[in-house]
Amino acid sequence: MSIPETSKAVVVEGEKIVVKDVPVQQLTGTQILVKVKAVAGNPTDWKHLDYKIAPQGSIIGNDLAGTVVKLGPDVDATRFAVGKTVIGGVHGGSVKFPQYGAFTEYAVLDSVLTFQVDLTESGATSIAEGPVKNFESGASLPVSLLTAGEVLHYHFKNKLEWEPKSPQHDFPILIWGGATAAGQWLIQLAKQMFCYSEIVVVASKKHEQLLKKYGADAVFDYHDEDVIEQMRGKYGGFKHLVDGVSVPETFRQVYQLAAPGATIIPLMNLGEKDIPEAERKTGITIDPTLLYLVFGHDVPFGPHTFPANPAYRSAAVDLVKFLEPRIKNGALNHIPIEVYPGGLEAIPRILSDIKNGANSGVKLVARV
Protein backbone atom coordinates (compact mmCIF):
# COMPACT_ATOMS: atom_id res chain seq x y z
CA MET A 1 0.00 0.00 0.00
CA SER A 2 1.37 3.38 -1.02
CA ILE A 3 1.66 5.82 1.89
CA PRO A 4 1.62 9.53 1.05
CA GLU A 5 4.11 11.99 2.49
CA THR A 6 1.35 14.29 3.78
CA SER A 7 -2.04 13.80 5.39
CA LYS A 8 -4.99 16.13 5.89
CA ALA A 9 -5.52 16.87 9.57
CA VAL A 10 -7.48 19.15 11.91
CA VAL A 11 -4.94 21.47 13.53
CA VAL A 12 -4.98 24.43 15.89
CA GLU A 13 -4.47 27.74 14.10
CA GLY A 14 -4.96 30.92 16.09
CA GLU A 15 -8.25 30.76 17.97
CA LYS A 16 -9.79 28.07 15.74
CA ILE A 17 -9.15 24.73 14.10
CA VAL A 18 -8.58 24.25 10.38
CA VAL A 19 -8.02 21.33 8.00
CA LYS A 20 -4.58 21.43 6.41
CA ASP A 21 -1.82 19.14 5.16
CA VAL A 22 0.71 17.81 7.70
CA PRO A 23 3.60 15.35 7.34
CA VAL A 24 2.85 11.65 7.81
CA GLN A 25 4.95 10.59 10.80
CA GLN A 26 7.70 7.97 10.88
CA LEU A 27 7.33 5.13 13.37
CA THR A 28 9.39 4.06 16.36
CA GLY A 29 9.10 1.21 18.87
CA THR A 30 5.61 -0.27 19.20
CA GLN A 31 3.91 2.37 17.05
CA ILE A 32 1.66 1.55 14.10
CA LEU A 33 0.50 3.80 11.26
CA VAL A 34 -3.24 3.67 10.63
CA LYS A 35 -5.32 4.84 7.67
CA VAL A 36 -8.14 6.45 9.62
CA LYS A 37 -11.68 5.47 8.66
CA ALA A 38 -13.71 7.08 11.48
CA VAL A 39 -13.13 9.42 14.42
CA ALA A 40 -15.21 10.39 17.46
CA GLY A 41 -15.43 13.59 19.47
CA ASN A 42 -14.91 13.90 23.22
CA PRO A 43 -15.45 16.78 25.66
CA THR A 44 -11.69 16.94 26.16
CA ASP A 45 -11.31 17.99 22.50
CA TRP A 46 -13.14 21.30 22.83
CA LYS A 47 -11.64 21.86 26.29
CA HIS A 48 -8.15 21.57 24.79
CA LEU A 49 -9.11 24.43 22.49
CA ASP A 50 -11.12 26.68 24.79
CA TYR A 51 -8.69 26.36 27.69
CA LYS A 52 -5.72 26.83 25.34
CA ILE A 53 -4.12 23.53 26.36
CA ALA A 54 -3.45 22.48 22.76
CA PRO A 55 -0.41 24.26 21.26
CA GLN A 56 -0.49 26.04 17.93
CA GLY A 57 -0.13 23.66 14.99
CA SER A 58 -1.04 20.57 17.01
CA ILE A 59 -3.38 17.91 15.64
CA ILE A 60 -6.43 17.45 17.86
CA GLY A 61 -8.70 14.47 18.47
CA ASN A 62 -8.37 11.33 20.58
CA ASP A 63 -10.58 8.50 19.27
CA LEU A 64 -10.22 6.66 15.96
CA ALA A 65 -10.68 3.42 14.08
CA GLY A 66 -8.98 2.41 10.85
CA THR A 67 -6.71 0.03 8.97
CA VAL A 68 -3.04 -0.67 9.71
CA VAL A 69 -0.74 0.40 6.85
CA LYS A 70 2.69 0.15 8.52
CA LEU A 71 4.29 -1.41 11.61
CA GLY A 72 7.01 -0.01 13.87
CA PRO A 73 10.10 -2.15 14.56
CA ASP A 74 8.90 -3.51 17.93
CA VAL A 75 5.25 -4.26 17.16
CA ASP A 76 3.91 -7.71 18.13
CA ALA A 77 3.41 -9.31 14.72
CA THR A 78 1.20 -12.01 16.24
CA ARG A 79 -1.45 -9.33 16.94
CA PHE A 80 -0.96 -6.78 14.18
CA ALA A 81 -0.30 -6.85 10.46
CA VAL A 82 -0.78 -4.51 7.53
CA GLY A 83 -4.45 -4.68 6.53
CA LYS A 84 -5.76 -5.46 10.02
CA THR A 85 -8.47 -3.17 11.38
CA VAL A 86 -7.93 -1.49 14.73
CA ILE A 87 -9.41 0.81 17.39
CA GLY A 88 -7.20 3.16 19.36
CA GLY A 89 -6.67 6.48 21.05
CA VAL A 90 -4.05 9.22 21.07
CA HIS A 91 -3.50 12.44 23.01
CA GLY A 92 -4.67 15.02 20.52
CA GLY A 93 -3.51 18.57 21.20
CA SER A 94 -0.53 17.30 23.19
CA VAL A 95 2.10 19.80 24.30
CA LYS A 96 4.91 17.22 24.13
CA PHE A 97 3.77 15.43 20.97
CA PRO A 98 1.75 17.91 18.87
CA GLN A 99 2.32 15.82 15.72
CA TYR A 100 -0.01 13.08 17.02
CA GLY A 101 -3.80 13.36 16.96
CA ALA A 102 -6.83 11.38 15.81
CA PHE A 103 -8.45 13.90 13.47
CA THR A 104 -6.31 13.10 10.44
CA GLU A 105 -6.14 10.75 7.47
CA TYR A 106 -3.08 8.87 8.77
CA ALA A 107 -2.59 8.54 12.52
CA VAL A 108 0.06 6.97 14.75
CA LEU A 109 -1.10 4.62 17.53
CA ASP A 110 0.77 2.83 20.30
CA SER A 111 0.01 -0.81 19.49
CA VAL A 112 0.11 -1.99 23.12
CA LEU A 113 -2.86 0.31 23.80
CA THR A 114 -4.71 -0.61 20.59
CA PHE A 115 -7.59 -3.07 20.09
CA GLN A 116 -7.42 -5.35 17.05
CA VAL A 117 -11.03 -5.95 16.06
CA ASP A 118 -12.47 -6.93 12.65
CA LEU A 119 -14.41 -3.94 11.33
CA THR A 120 -16.33 -2.98 8.18
CA GLU A 121 -17.83 0.30 6.97
CA SER A 122 -21.40 0.99 8.09
CA GLY A 123 -22.69 3.85 5.94
CA ALA A 124 -25.52 4.53 8.42
CA THR A 125 -26.17 7.97 9.90
CA SER A 126 -27.48 6.60 13.22
CA ILE A 127 -26.25 3.37 14.82
CA ALA A 128 -28.06 1.89 17.82
CA GLU A 129 -26.10 0.43 20.71
CA GLY A 130 -24.80 -3.04 20.03
CA PRO A 131 -21.73 -5.16 19.22
CA VAL A 132 -18.75 -3.37 17.68
CA LYS A 133 -18.74 -4.37 14.01
CA ASN A 134 -17.87 -1.22 12.05
CA PHE A 135 -15.36 1.63 12.05
CA GLU A 136 -17.96 4.13 13.24
CA SER A 137 -18.80 2.16 16.38
CA GLY A 138 -15.15 1.29 16.92
CA ALA A 139 -14.16 4.95 16.96
CA SER A 140 -16.55 5.53 19.86
CA LEU A 141 -14.60 3.29 22.25
CA PRO A 142 -11.03 4.22 23.20
CA VAL A 143 -11.10 7.22 25.56
CA SER A 144 -14.35 6.44 27.34
CA LEU A 145 -13.79 2.67 27.59
CA LEU A 146 -10.24 2.92 28.91
CA THR A 147 -11.21 5.74 31.28
CA ALA A 148 -13.93 3.54 32.77
CA GLY A 149 -11.51 0.64 32.96
CA GLU A 150 -8.84 2.69 34.74
CA VAL A 151 -11.37 3.99 37.27
CA LEU A 152 -12.57 0.51 38.18
CA HIS A 153 -9.25 -1.36 37.94
CA TYR A 154 -6.45 1.09 38.75
CA HIS A 155 -8.23 3.48 41.12
CA PHE A 156 -10.78 1.22 42.82
CA LYS A 157 -8.65 -1.97 42.66
CA ASN A 158 -11.26 -4.20 41.04
CA LYS A 159 -9.69 -7.32 39.55
CA LEU A 160 -9.96 -8.06 35.84
CA GLU A 161 -12.40 -10.93 36.24
CA TRP A 162 -15.38 -11.60 33.99
CA GLU A 163 -18.69 -12.46 35.67
CA PRO A 164 -17.34 -13.60 39.06
CA LYS A 165 -19.86 -15.29 41.32
CA SER A 166 -19.80 -12.69 44.12
CA PRO A 167 -19.27 -8.91 44.20
CA GLN A 168 -15.69 -7.72 44.44
CA HIS A 169 -16.87 -4.94 46.77
CA ASP A 170 -19.86 -5.70 48.99
CA PHE A 171 -21.21 -2.14 48.81
CA PRO A 172 -22.77 0.05 46.08
CA ILE A 173 -20.98 2.42 43.69
CA LEU A 174 -22.36 5.80 42.68
CA ILE A 175 -21.90 6.84 39.03
CA TRP A 176 -23.00 10.43 38.45
CA GLY A 177 -23.50 11.03 34.73
CA GLY A 178 -24.49 7.51 33.72
CA ALA A 179 -25.48 8.55 30.19
CA THR A 180 -22.08 10.04 29.39
CA ALA A 181 -19.84 7.84 27.26
CA ALA A 182 -17.61 7.04 30.24
CA GLY A 183 -20.69 6.51 32.41
CA GLN A 184 -22.21 3.96 30.04
CA TRP A 185 -18.94 2.02 29.98
CA LEU A 186 -18.59 2.22 33.76
CA ILE A 187 -22.01 0.62 34.12
CA GLN A 188 -21.26 -2.15 31.63
CA LEU A 189 -17.87 -3.01 33.10
CA ALA A 190 -18.99 -2.77 36.72
CA LYS A 191 -21.84 -5.16 35.89
CA GLN A 192 -19.84 -7.72 33.88
CA MET A 193 -16.95 -7.69 36.37
CA PHE A 194 -19.41 -7.77 39.32
CA CYS A 195 -17.45 -4.98 40.96
CA TYR A 196 -20.17 -3.89 43.42
CA SER A 197 -23.25 -5.17 45.16
CA GLU A 198 -25.28 -2.45 43.46
CA ILE A 199 -24.76 0.07 40.65
CA VAL A 200 -26.46 3.37 41.48
CA VAL A 201 -26.62 5.90 38.65
CA VAL A 202 -27.58 9.54 38.27
CA ALA A 203 -28.78 10.49 34.78
CA SER A 204 -31.79 11.86 32.95
CA LYS A 205 -34.76 9.50 33.29
CA LYS A 206 -35.01 9.39 29.48
CA HIS A 207 -31.92 7.15 29.53
CA GLU A 208 -33.17 4.84 32.29
CA GLN A 209 -34.17 1.92 30.04
CA LEU A 210 -30.79 1.80 28.26
CA LEU A 211 -28.76 2.20 31.45
CA LYS A 212 -30.69 -0.57 33.20
CA LYS A 213 -30.10 -2.77 30.16
CA TYR A 214 -26.37 -2.20 30.67
CA GLY A 215 -26.61 -3.11 34.35
CA ALA A 216 -27.69 -0.11 36.41
CA ASP A 217 -29.71 -1.22 39.43
CA ALA A 218 -31.16 2.20 40.28
CA VAL A 219 -31.38 5.40 38.23
CA PHE A 220 -32.00 8.77 39.86
CA ASP A 221 -32.90 11.81 37.78
CA TYR A 222 -30.56 14.76 38.27
CA HIS A 223 -33.42 17.07 37.26
CA ASP A 224 -35.15 16.33 40.59
CA GLU A 225 -34.45 19.13 43.04
CA ASP A 226 -34.30 16.64 45.90
CA VAL A 227 -32.11 14.07 44.12
CA ILE A 228 -29.45 14.27 46.87
CA GLU A 229 -32.06 13.74 49.58
CA GLN A 230 -33.56 10.81 47.65
CA MET A 231 -30.24 8.98 47.54
CA ARG A 232 -29.26 9.87 51.08
CA GLY A 233 -32.59 8.50 52.28
CA LYS A 234 -32.00 5.16 50.58
CA TYR A 235 -28.22 4.70 50.81
CA GLY A 236 -26.89 7.15 53.38
CA GLY A 237 -23.55 7.68 51.68
CA PHE A 238 -21.28 5.91 49.21
CA LYS A 239 -17.72 4.64 49.64
CA HIS A 240 -16.85 4.69 45.92
CA LEU A 241 -18.12 7.56 43.76
CA VAL A 242 -17.40 8.63 40.17
CA ASP A 243 -18.25 12.02 38.72
CA GLY A 244 -18.69 11.25 35.02
CA VAL A 245 -19.66 14.85 34.23
CA SER A 246 -16.95 16.53 36.30
CA VAL A 247 -17.92 20.16 36.38
CA PRO A 248 -17.87 22.08 39.67
CA GLU A 249 -21.65 21.74 40.19
CA THR A 250 -21.77 17.95 39.77
CA PHE A 251 -18.56 17.48 41.74
CA ARG A 252 -20.10 19.33 44.68
CA GLN A 253 -23.21 17.13 44.48
CA VAL A 254 -21.16 13.94 44.34
CA TYR A 255 -19.06 15.15 47.29
CA GLN A 256 -22.23 15.60 49.37
CA LEU A 257 -22.98 11.89 48.93
CA ALA A 258 -19.55 10.68 50.08
CA ALA A 259 -19.54 8.49 53.19
CA PRO A 260 -16.74 8.82 55.79
CA GLY A 261 -13.53 7.44 54.28
CA ALA A 262 -14.92 7.54 50.76
CA THR A 263 -12.95 7.86 47.51
CA ILE A 264 -14.23 10.13 44.72
CA ILE A 265 -12.90 9.87 41.16
CA PRO A 266 -13.54 12.97 39.01
CA LEU A 267 -12.66 12.77 35.32
CA MET A 268 -11.19 16.28 35.40
CA ASN A 269 -8.66 17.85 37.74
CA LEU A 270 -11.16 18.77 40.46
CA GLY A 271 -10.35 18.69 44.16
CA GLU A 272 -11.19 19.95 47.62
CA LYS A 273 -10.49 23.50 46.40
CA ASP A 274 -13.71 23.20 44.35
CA ILE A 275 -15.84 22.45 47.44
CA PRO A 276 -17.11 25.37 49.56
CA GLU A 277 -15.12 25.46 52.77
CA ALA A 278 -18.21 25.03 54.94
CA GLU A 279 -19.06 21.76 53.16
CA ARG A 280 -15.66 20.11 53.36
CA LYS A 281 -15.27 16.84 55.26
CA THR A 282 -12.27 15.08 56.73
CA GLY A 283 -11.15 11.67 55.50
CA ILE A 284 -12.41 12.00 51.89
CA THR A 285 -9.96 10.95 49.17
CA ILE A 286 -10.27 12.78 45.84
CA ASP A 287 -8.25 11.00 43.15
CA PRO A 288 -8.75 12.45 39.63
CA THR A 289 -8.00 10.20 36.69
CA LEU A 290 -6.06 11.47 33.66
CA LEU A 291 -6.16 8.98 30.81
CA TYR A 292 -3.27 10.63 28.97
CA LEU A 293 -0.92 9.01 31.49
CA VAL A 294 -1.45 5.69 29.66
CA PHE A 295 1.11 6.84 27.08
CA GLY A 296 3.94 6.56 29.58
CA HIS A 297 5.37 10.06 29.81
CA ASP A 298 4.93 13.31 31.74
CA VAL A 299 1.81 15.20 30.64
CA PRO A 300 1.91 19.02 30.60
CA PHE A 301 -1.75 19.96 30.96
CA GLY A 302 -2.60 23.63 31.34
CA PRO A 303 -0.73 25.04 34.35
CA HIS A 304 0.12 21.56 35.67
CA THR A 305 2.52 18.83 34.61
CA PHE A 306 1.45 15.35 35.64
CA PRO A 307 4.42 13.00 36.15
CA ALA A 308 4.64 9.72 34.26
CA ASN A 309 2.85 6.88 36.03
CA PRO A 310 4.14 3.44 34.96
CA ALA A 311 1.50 1.61 37.02
CA TYR A 312 -1.29 3.54 35.28
CA ARG A 313 0.14 2.62 31.87
CA SER A 314 0.56 -1.01 32.91
CA ALA A 315 -3.08 -1.14 34.02
CA ALA A 316 -4.16 0.16 30.60
CA VAL A 317 -2.11 -2.48 28.78
CA ASP A 318 -3.76 -5.16 30.92
CA LEU A 319 -7.19 -3.67 30.22
CA VAL A 320 -6.65 -3.83 26.45
CA LYS A 321 -5.71 -7.52 26.70
CA PHE A 322 -8.68 -8.23 28.96
CA LEU A 323 -11.30 -6.27 27.00
CA GLU A 324 -10.30 -7.03 23.41
CA PRO A 325 -11.80 -10.56 23.29
CA ARG A 326 -15.00 -9.25 24.91
CA ILE A 327 -15.30 -6.59 22.20
CA LYS A 328 -14.71 -9.20 19.53
CA ASN A 329 -17.34 -11.62 20.84
CA GLY A 330 -20.00 -8.95 21.38
CA ALA A 331 -20.10 -9.19 25.17
CA LEU A 332 -19.56 -5.41 25.32
CA ASN A 333 -21.80 -3.00 23.43
CA HIS A 334 -20.83 0.36 21.98
CA ILE A 335 -23.08 3.25 22.95
CA PRO A 336 -25.54 4.86 20.47
CA ILE A 337 -23.84 6.78 17.65
CA GLU A 338 -24.70 9.72 15.42
CA VAL A 339 -22.56 10.08 12.28
CA TYR A 340 -21.97 13.60 10.93
CA PRO A 341 -21.40 14.08 7.19
CA GLY A 342 -18.45 16.03 5.83
CA GLY A 343 -15.42 14.08 7.02
CA LEU A 344 -12.78 16.14 8.83
CA GLU A 345 -14.66 19.33 7.90
CA ALA A 346 -17.41 18.18 10.30
CA ILE A 347 -15.12 18.32 13.35
CA PRO A 348 -15.83 21.96 14.35
CA ARG A 349 -19.58 21.24 14.38
CA ILE A 350 -19.09 18.02 16.36
CA LEU A 351 -17.04 19.81 19.01
CA SER A 352 -19.52 22.68 19.20
CA ASP A 353 -22.41 20.25 19.61
CA ILE A 354 -20.58 18.35 22.36
CA LYS A 355 -19.86 21.62 24.15
CA ASN A 356 -23.57 22.50 23.95
CA GLY A 357 -24.74 19.10 25.22
CA ALA A 358 -26.04 17.61 21.98
CA ASN A 359 -24.14 14.39 22.75
CA SER A 360 -26.38 13.38 25.66
CA GLY A 361 -26.47 9.59 25.61
CA VAL A 362 -24.70 9.31 22.24
CA LYS A 363 -21.26 9.49 20.64
CA LEU A 364 -20.73 11.91 17.75
CA VAL A 365 -18.66 10.43 14.93
CA ALA A 366 -17.33 11.44 11.50
CA ARG A 367 -16.05 9.23 8.69
CA VAL A 368 -12.66 10.13 7.24
Image (cartoon, rainbow, N blue to C red):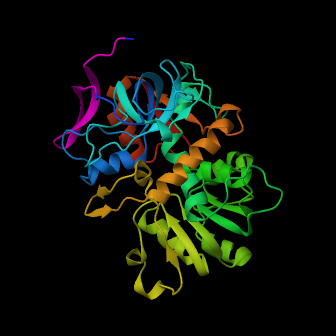
Q: Quadrant of the N terminus?
A: top left
Residue 264 covered by magenta stretch: no
In the displayed structure image, the side of residue 57 where residue 38 appears, left or right: right
Of residues 96 and 56, the one drawn nearer to the viewer in this rendering: 96
Residue 229 occupies quadrant: bottom right
Q: Residue at x 49, y 59 (%)?
A: 311
**Magenta-drawn stretch, dominant element (helix, strand or loop):** strand
Location of residue 134 (image quadrant): top right
Residues rendered magenta in the picture: 2-24
Residue 68: x percent and y percent? Answer: 46, 23
Residue 303 x, y percent position in the rendering: 25, 63
Q: Which residue is at the far left? A: 14
Residue farthest to the top?
2
In the rendered image, residue 9 lying in the magenta stretch gets the answer: yes
Residue 130 position in % (x across, y down): 67, 33
Look at the image and tell me in which quarter the C terminus lies. Answer: top left
Question: Which x, y percent locates residue 234?
Answer: 73, 74
